[in-house]
Image (cartoon, rainbow, N blue to C red):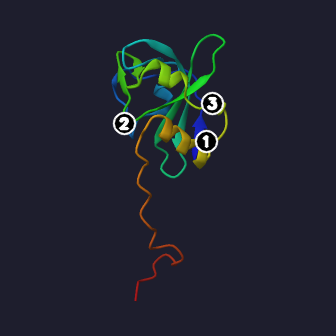
Amino acid sequence: MCTFVVFDEQSRPVGGTVQTDIDPRSLIGRKAYDRDGNKIGTVDEVYLDDATGVPEWAAVRTGLFGRDAFVPLEPSELIDDGLHVPYERSLIKDAPDFGVGRHLSPEQELQLYRHYDIALPAPPPPDHDFGRLAGQEEA
């Protein structure tokens, strides 16, 4: 699942590749462009992975009376103060519409991965310390 975050447009750094350590606040209010450089809209919200806190999806407002289209942040890039998404405009505009301002469920994320033909992320490694008290040694 992903949690959405909403920030104001204050203190937005400029430039760089979208990385796992990016500050989500730096994306809000940026213009978003498709792979051909066509403007698709403005980033409204950023969705973070619940388990890792890593920015995973952006909701892009696609026009004055448009809706928000979800776009993957990996492998998108920040170029000249804009978010460049490596997909065609039509594919982005046809992305599943889940509304904004709430969690993305695992099923919704799966639909987005399929829509953009992105490989699913690897599951987290098992937690071998689960159920053990702090300071307990393994026998």
Of residues 135 and 58, the one drawn nearer to the viewer in this rendering: 58
Residue depicted at x 67% and y 33%: 101
Image x and y of residue 138, in percent:
41, 84
Question: Mark 3 against mark 2, which lies toward the viewer?
Answer: 3
**Answer yes or no: do the residues labelled 3 and 2 have beta carbons within 8 Å?**
no
Q: What's the amino acid at mark 3? A: Asp
Query: Could you tell whether 17 is left or right of 99 in the image?
Result: left
Mark 1: which amino acid? Leu
Q: Amino acid at mark 2?
A: Gln
Q: Earlier in the sequence, mark 3 or mark 2?
A: 2
Task: Please tell me whether mark 3 sits on a helix, a strand or a loop.
Answer: loop
Q: Residue at x 51, y 78 (%)?
A: 132
For disc 2, the marked residue is: 19
- Depicted 47 relative to depicted 131: above or below: above
Q: Quadrant of the C terminus?
A: bottom left
Location of residue 45 with respect to 21 vertically, above or below: above
Give the residue number, with chain letter if any, for mark 3. Answer: 97
Choose between 36 and 48: the one closer to the eye.
36
Which element type, helix, strand or loop, lies under badge 2? loop
Local secondary structure at mark 1: loop
The image shows residue 14 at horizontal and vertical percentages of 38, 20
Which of the 4 quarters of the picture holds residue 60?
top right
Residue identifier under label 1 = 104
Precedes in sequence: disc 1 or disc 3: 3
